[in-house]
Amino acid sequence: MSIIGWIREGDAAACGGHVEHGHPAYTSHGKPLAHDGSPMKCGKNCVVKAGPHHFTLPDGLPQALHGDQTSGGCPLMSTLNGIHGIDDPSGAPVTTAYFQPAAAAPAAPGLAAAAQDEALWVPGRYDDRYVLLGAGSGEPLAYVDYAIEREDGSVEHGTTDAEGHTHLLKQTLEREHVRIYLEDNA
C-alpha cells in the first residue's frame, strides 16, 4: 500500500505557487495542514480547493490531499507522500509530477502566457527521476550526458539510460528547484 500525502504549508502547486498558510491548530511534521480555502502564494491569488474525498480536519474543514487543486486548476503536490496521509489500497505509485503538454507547444508571440493558463494538467508518467526528451521529436534522449544544477549550487553529472532517465536525486521533505543542462561532447 502507498500513502497519499496531506497538503501542508509550503507544499507546491504544479504551476509554481505554494500553500502560504495552513491551519494553525493542526500540523504534520512541524508544518500546518492545508484545508479548503487555504491561501496560495501565486500570481493569480488562488486558494486550495480540497477534492471530493471527504477527509476533514477535526473542526470540520475539508482537508487537502496530494492531487487536489487550487482554485486556478493547478494540482497540489504533497511533501508527505509515503509519510503521512491516507492509505491507497491500489498500491499504485503516487504521481510525483504534473505537466501541461498543450502549454509546451509553440504558441504565437504574446499568447504563451494565455496558453499556459488554459492548458490542462496531466499526471507525470515517470518516477522521481527526470526524463529528458528531444525538443523536436518528443522521444527520450538515450545515453546523453547531462548536468543537474541543484538549488544549493552543487552540480551532478550523469548519462541518461535507454529510456532517457536521469539518476535519482536524493529525496527530501522540502521542495527543490533544479536546472538540467545537456552537455556538449563535441
Image (tube, rainbow, N blue to C red):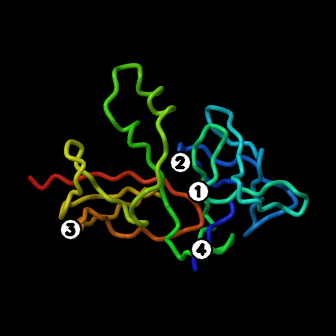
Residue nearest the viewer, comparing 35 with 53? 53
Callout 2 touching callout 4 (CB < 8 Å): no
Where is residue 100? Give x, y as percent: 43, 43
Mark 3 secondary-structure assignment:
loop
Cα separation, mark 2 vs mark 4, equals: 19 Å
Figure quadrant of residue 183: bottom left
- Is residue 140 rendered to the left or right of residue 174? left
Residue type at mark 3: give it.
Ala
* Res 82 label: 4
Cα separation, mark 3 vs mark 4, equals: 28 Å
Q: Earlier in the sequence, mark 2 or mark 1?
A: 2
Q: Earlier in the sequence, mark 3 or mark 4?
A: 4
Residue nearest the viewer, comparing 156 with 44? 44
The residue where tag 3 is placed is: 162
- Is residue 85 rendered to the left or right of residue 145? right
Residue at x 65% of width, y 75% of height = 87
Residue type at mark 1: give it.
Met
* Res 107 label: none
The residue where tag 2 is placed is: 14
Residue nearest the viewer, comparing 176 with 68? 68
Mark 2 secondary-structure assignment:
loop
Cα separation, mark 1 vs mark 3, equals: 28 Å
